[in-house]
Image (spheres, grey):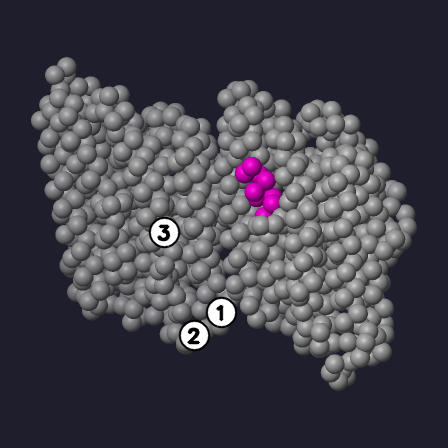
């Protein structure tokens, strides 16, 4: 059977790029940050362009990966996330002394893990991709070695991640034992006649627990605020957007492929988890005065909305889900990224009082942060509004009215805490003089891109929606 | 001959463009103010031009309008950029443009910092309101309904008075909360229509033809009712209004009272009633009750106030209560009265807020029990204040009288008891306005006042506000004729309601 190696060109580019960055770091003792950054950015952009432009000759790669439109969409999305993270992190990491080869290369390898996870059709390659993503993230979170908070966050994420991987591995093993195959689609739908359903349900439950840890689903979300708060802001941005989007890509694939008897037992559990996640995330964010924690809990709430759409995925909510994943990635990247851009070198901008008056002393970065917050809250004319509209439409069409009402109630609660930050930024005088570094080109470019994208998608998302509708027509198998 | 329908698009986008231009010229205060004023005057001129064009009703894909446009926007969702003008929206557009010019003029010397942003938000708000009054696509309407929150939040929160942060956050939470329930109802209606006809659309005209079961219709109507009741406001979801009005800067209060409250009532007329006629009809007793409660409760509280702005804010609630009574009666006369009252209340209450602003600038206080004897000191101001106070309480010959008498007579024809109670409510309004006038203008001065009378700019503003008051009071015919076509238009869309006539 002929293997079309060029089909996995984006993956090869990412792997080679990562190695190139490591080599540059090894052979150039001074480890010039500009060179490492440029190599990393070029890799990410190159991989993204190839994923966008090249149609694979044979979508099924060695039975391990499915490189059709679904994986390509996520590939491009991950490369956008990675490029924006690199732009946001360059000056940030330089000023704080961790702009070495390991930082840039590990971002690339985490992106590679995400791509593998989204494209995987075989449990082993999925697990490999997830581990690659996780290990890169463990180091990235703790990369700032002069602050105890980052170290603590790294250890917490590592322990949590190890536990999650253990659950996942056991679940996959049980599934293999029950169904006799490690192909994702086959193990979820085409079961032999004597496949024991209770074992399969247990396996799926364990897999859900493992994945649930990673996407901060309630009740496995307790690590989220501590890790998001401790990690450096650009890394938090990357973690919050990239890993969630990647794992949702997998969850969608699992849900769509899940056979009837199992899905009838699974979706009520997902219903309850979605409701709990929306409620818990938004209610706990209500009381936060440390904004990194507030944004962490808010991202738990956003996961709740995505889970709500996941419950309806067999009834046509896929376009809404894909659109909201893309929009969520942009919004959260913008929020955490601008938070990092407004931070002092000593530690990240966290306390609410420190935000006061920033709307006037640092107008551009605050404006981008404000637009991202308004988008997270779901106000027009931002993309967040259209995303929520599509989500609620899909859920109501699938007749999950109660879930939609719960979603609306939690959205109302969320307005309060997003506006809390806006009030601090624009309606209160500055509390103390902050030593914030000047706006640099990378942050400006990333911020401008996110701002334009959020407003443009909020008013005229037709092009993106057309792409997504085409992808959804061919369900990921 | 240019296609006049294009004017609608220009009217919506001109203030939005103007807002960004004003923001860009923010550094130079004089240039910024004049730019904003120019844009708002051009907008007023355009809308007046449409008024004098006197377009005739034409049928189209979105219903029967005087002028209409319909462009593709989000094809995948079935949402179109549809705008439609009828008599009601024309008058509300005139009011919007007029009050925006007024807001810019009265803020000329009061607003000294962040001038660029201030005019940005004022003009942006105007653009949103114009879009709201013209939208024929329910999603487009919802978009403008939500966006109007943002400029108002900043206007109150940045340039307001001492308790402004609390007032602006409360305003956002109340309004946004109600709107989100409306979003669910809107989406449910959209989905039901899609199931019935096979194609999904947000067009008002199409959605109004969906057949709904009574229970579903009731729930959806209730969600819309909640959202609009918060905006109007109806008791008991009115508590955001006194704080928002009191803490807002004068231009903010003018826009809030003059325009934002009208959006709630307009939305009832344009959306809630045609979309859910059965439930709307069944809800008229509730509307009547809430309107009456609003009038009495607001009057009771207003009698206890010492802050002028807060008193005028409560008088707004009372006026809107009377308008809702007119809506609940649902005959041609009462509806004409309510629609006319929209315009009247917009002008009179805004004028009162303008005068309160001028008084605040001179006195530094809004406590009218500490005033008194103003007539001797600043006679021109006092004359105008008396004039607008009389117009607000419904003196015959001035604008509010026409609206109120139409509502009361229309109510008497259908439900006499309600009419009598409403009449008592109107009398209560007279009481607190007269008390306000007596305590502030007449009697002995409580404190030494040493300030100047009105400047020419201020006299100009008050004169151009007084003229419509007189005109509508003495010659309301042409405007009422404009409303006739809107009422008949609504009845044509709502066969059930037509049975009442």
N-terminal of the two: label 3 or label 2? Answer: 3
Pointer 3: what residue?
A283
Is residue A202 shown left or right of residue A352? left
Chain label for disc 2: A
Identify the element where label 3 is drawn: helix
x 52%, y 49%: residue: B176
Magenta run includes residue A305? no
Q: Residue B174, how many percent across, how many down?
A: 53, 51
Q: Residue B414, how many percent across, how many down?
A: 77, 34
Pointer 2: what residue?
A431
Q: Is residue A381 above or below residue A310?
A: below
Pointer 1: what residue?
A428
Chain label for disc 1: A
Q: Is residue B118 visible?
A: no
Of all residues, the one furthest to the top in this rendering is A193
Q: Residue A311, how many percent across, how many down?
A: 33, 32
């Amino acid at each position: 059977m002929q293997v079309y190696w060029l089909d996995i060109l984006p993956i090869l580019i990412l792997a080679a790029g990562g190695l190139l960055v490591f080599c540059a770091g090894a052979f150039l003792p001074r480890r010039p940050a500009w060179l490492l950054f440029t190599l990393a950015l070029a890799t990410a952009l190159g991989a993204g362009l190839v994923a966008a432009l090249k149609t694979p000759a044979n979508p099924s790669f060695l039975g391990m990966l499915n490189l059709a439109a679904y994986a390509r969409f996520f590939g491009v999305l991950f490369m956008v996330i990675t490029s924006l993270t690199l732009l946001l992190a360059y000056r940030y990491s330089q000023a704080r002394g961790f702009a070495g080869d390991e930082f840039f290369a590990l971002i690339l390898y985490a992106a590679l893990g995400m791509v593998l996870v989204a494209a995987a059709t075989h449990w082993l390659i999925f697990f490999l991709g997830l581990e690659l993503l996780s290990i890169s993230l463990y180091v990235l979170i703790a990369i700032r070695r002069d602050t105890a908070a980052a170290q603590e966050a790294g250890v917490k994420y590592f322990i949590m991640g190890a536990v999650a991987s253990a659950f996942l591995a056991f679940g996959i093993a049980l599934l293999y034992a029950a169904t006799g195959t490690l192909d994702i689609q086959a193990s979820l739908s085409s079961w032999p006649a004597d496949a024991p359903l209770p074992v399969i349900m247990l396996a799926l439950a364990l897999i859900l627990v493992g994945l649930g840890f990673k996407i901060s689903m309630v009740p496995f979300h307790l690590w989220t605020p501590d890790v998001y708060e401790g990690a450096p802001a650009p890394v938090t941005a990357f973690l919050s957007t990239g890993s969630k989007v990647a794992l949702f890509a997998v969850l969608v694939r699992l849900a769509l492929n899940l056979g009837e008897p199992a899905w009838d037992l699974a979706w009520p559990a997902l219903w309850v988890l979605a409701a709990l996640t929306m409620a818990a995330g938004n209610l706990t964010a209500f009381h936060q005065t440390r904004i990194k924690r507030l944004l962490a809990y808010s991202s738990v709430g956003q996961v709740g909305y995505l889970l709500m759409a996941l419950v309806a995925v067999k009834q046509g909510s896929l376009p809404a889900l894909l659109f909201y994943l893309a929009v969520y990635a942009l919004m959260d990247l913008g929020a955490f990224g601008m938070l990092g851009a407004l931070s002092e070198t000593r530690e990240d901008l966290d306390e609410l009082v420190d935000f006061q008056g920033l709307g006037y002393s640092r107008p551009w970065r605050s404006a981008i942060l404000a637009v991202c917050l308004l988008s997270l809250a779901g106000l027009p004319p931002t993309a967040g509004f259209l995303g929520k509209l599509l989500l609620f439409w899909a859920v109501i069409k699938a007749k999950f009215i109660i879930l939609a009402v719960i979603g609306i109630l939690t959205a109302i609660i969320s307005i309060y805490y997003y506006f809390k930050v806006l009030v601090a930024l624009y309606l209160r005088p500055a509390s103390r003089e902050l030593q914030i570094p000047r706006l640099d080109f990378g942050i400006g470019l990333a911020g401008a891109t996110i701002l334009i994208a959020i407003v443009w998608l909020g008013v005229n998302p037709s092009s993106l929606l057309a792409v997504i509708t085409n992808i959804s027509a061919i369900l990921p198998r | 001959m240019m296609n006049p329908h294009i004017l609608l698009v220009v009217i919506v986008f001109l203030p939005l463009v103007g807002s960004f231009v004003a923001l860009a010229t923010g550094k130079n205060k004089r240039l910024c103010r004049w730019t904003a004023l120019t844009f708002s005057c051009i907008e007023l001129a355009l809308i007046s031009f449409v008024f004098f064009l006197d377009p005739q009703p034409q049928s189209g894909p979105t219903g029967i309008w005087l002028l209409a446009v319909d462009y593709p926007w989000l094809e995948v969702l079935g949402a179109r950029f549809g705008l439609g003008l009828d008599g009601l929206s024309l008058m509300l557009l005139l009011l919007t443009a007029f009050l925006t010019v007024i807001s810019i003029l009265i803020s000329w010397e009061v607003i000294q910092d962040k001038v660029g942003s201030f005019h940005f938000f004022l003009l942006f708000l105007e653009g949103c309101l114009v879009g709201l009054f013209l939208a024929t696509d329910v999603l487009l309407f919802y978009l403008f309904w939500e966006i109007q929150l943002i400029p108002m939040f900043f206007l109150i929160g940045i340039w307001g008075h001492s308790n402004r942060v609390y007032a602006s956050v409360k305003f956002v939470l109340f309004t946004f909360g109600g709107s989100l329930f409306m979003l669910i109802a809107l989406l449910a209606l959209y989905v039901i229509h899609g199931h019935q006809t096979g194609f999904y659309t947000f067009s008002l005209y199409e959605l109004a033809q969906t057949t709904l079961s009574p229970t579903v219709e009731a729930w959806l109507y209730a969600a819309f009712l909640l959202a609009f009741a918060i905006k109007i406001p109806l008791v008991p979801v009115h508590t955001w209004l006194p704080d928002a009005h009191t803490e807002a800067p004068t231009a903010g209060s003018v826009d809030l009272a003059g325009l934002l409250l009208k959006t709630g009532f307009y939305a009832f007329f344009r959306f809630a009633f045609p979309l859910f006629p059965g439930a709307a009809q069944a809800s008229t007793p509730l509307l009547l009750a809430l309107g009456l409660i609003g009038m009495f409760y607001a009057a009771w509280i207003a009698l206890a106030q010492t802050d002028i702005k807060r008193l005028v804010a409560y008088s707004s609630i009372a006026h809107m209560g009377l308008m809702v009574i007119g809506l609940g009666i649902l005959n041609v006369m009462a509806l004409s009265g309510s629609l006319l009252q929209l315009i009247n209340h917009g002008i009179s209450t805004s004028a009162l807020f303008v005068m309160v602003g001028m008084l605040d600038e001179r006195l530094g206080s809004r406590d009218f029990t500490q005033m008194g004897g103003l007539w001797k000191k600043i006679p021109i101001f006092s004359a105008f204040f008396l004039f607008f106070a009389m117009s607000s309480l419904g003196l015959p010959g001035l604008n509010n009288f026409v609206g109120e008498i139409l509502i009361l007579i229309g109510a008497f024809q259908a439900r006499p008891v309600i009419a009598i109670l409403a009449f008592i409510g109107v009398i209560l309004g007279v009481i607190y306005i007269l008390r306000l006038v007596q305590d502030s203008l007449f009697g002995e001065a409580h404190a030494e006042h040493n300030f100047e009378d009105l400047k020419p700019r201020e006299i100009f503003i008050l004169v151009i506000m007084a003229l419509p008051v007189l005109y509508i009071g003495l010659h309301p015919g042409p405007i009422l004729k404009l409303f006739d076509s809107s009422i008949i238009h609504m009845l044509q869309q709502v066969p059930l309601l037509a049975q009442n006539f």
